Image: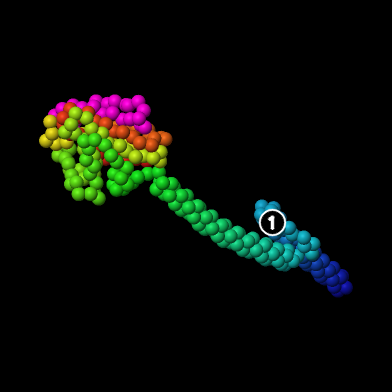
Amino acid sequence: MKKTEGKQSKGVKKNVLKLLIKIVVLITAAVGGAAVYRISVNVRLNKLIDNSKAINITNNTGSIEGIVYELINQLKEKDKELSKKNDEIIKLKEENAGLKVSNSSSEAAVGQDTSSTADNSDNDTKASTDAEVMDLFGDGEARTVYSLDNDEGSFKIAGEDYYSGVTIGNAESGCVYVNLKKKYKHISFDVGRVDECPINDGKLLLIKDEGNPKKYDLDAEKSLMSFELDVTGTDRLKIQIDPDWTTYGIVNVKVE
């Protein structure tokens, strides 16, 4: 009887010992698993942090909660810094836009002043209207000055009516003087035989201040022939036409 009880007691002890061993193993495994999990989380977080190059984990408690809490706080700080930088960028953009508007206004003002100056300069050196141009034509021989401001009427060249210009003819020679008064640098004009006049070729002579004449042939068959001359420093220009008893007209006069 006692032997039987001793065997049973030993069996119970063995079973209890086995159970304790299993519990220890399970506890060890659980603790080890938690440690491995924590290490895995730390590794992942550190990889994320290394990739971002923006956040450093300094928590030494070893708890996941502590690491996450510190990470959230640092993210909040970074968000504040980014928000501040964004506000600075917006302010700089607004200032830059204001500078562009101010610069554009200044350029427009400068351009307007320059244009005004150029216009005033042109008014001093260019006769742009019919009256201004025709007022430059003065005395002469066998010539008629036509202008919109007088009652001379008009004349025709190649079927086109001209109300502004000069005709020279019905004589062996004729001329007209242009009073430039050394104000102009260039003169240009067209010459053509007046309609219904004899088809006779002529000669054109341009003489600056009684200097040597420039001579040109006039073709009675051509409707208009163009001429231009540098008149820098010229006081009076003499336009002489030897029409051979026909009439030629001077039109489209421009001086500048």
Q: Quadrant of the N terminus?
A: bottom right
Q: Quadrant of the C terminus?
A: top left
The residue wearing badge 1 is 54
Q: Is residue 131 visible?
A: yes
**Horizontally, is 58 left or right of 92 in the view?**
right
Q: Position of residue 210 (x, y in %)?
A: 35, 30
**Horizontally, is 134 left or right of 15 in the view?**
left
Q: Is residue 148 magenta?
A: no
Observer-nearest of 208 and 124: 208
The image quadrant of residue 76 is bottom right
Observer-nearest of 31 and 216: 216
Q: Position of residue 176 (x, y in %)?
A: 27, 36
Please rate how many residues cluster around mark 1, counting C-alpha atoms within 10 Å: few if below 14, some from 14 to 19, many from 20: few
Q: Is residue 205 magenta?
A: yes
Magenta-highlighted residues? 199-226
Picture layout, residue 139 above or below residue 23:
above
Q: Position of residue 21 (x, y in %)?
A: 80, 64
Observer-nearest of 66 and 154: 154
Picture layout, residue 85 above or below residue 178:
below
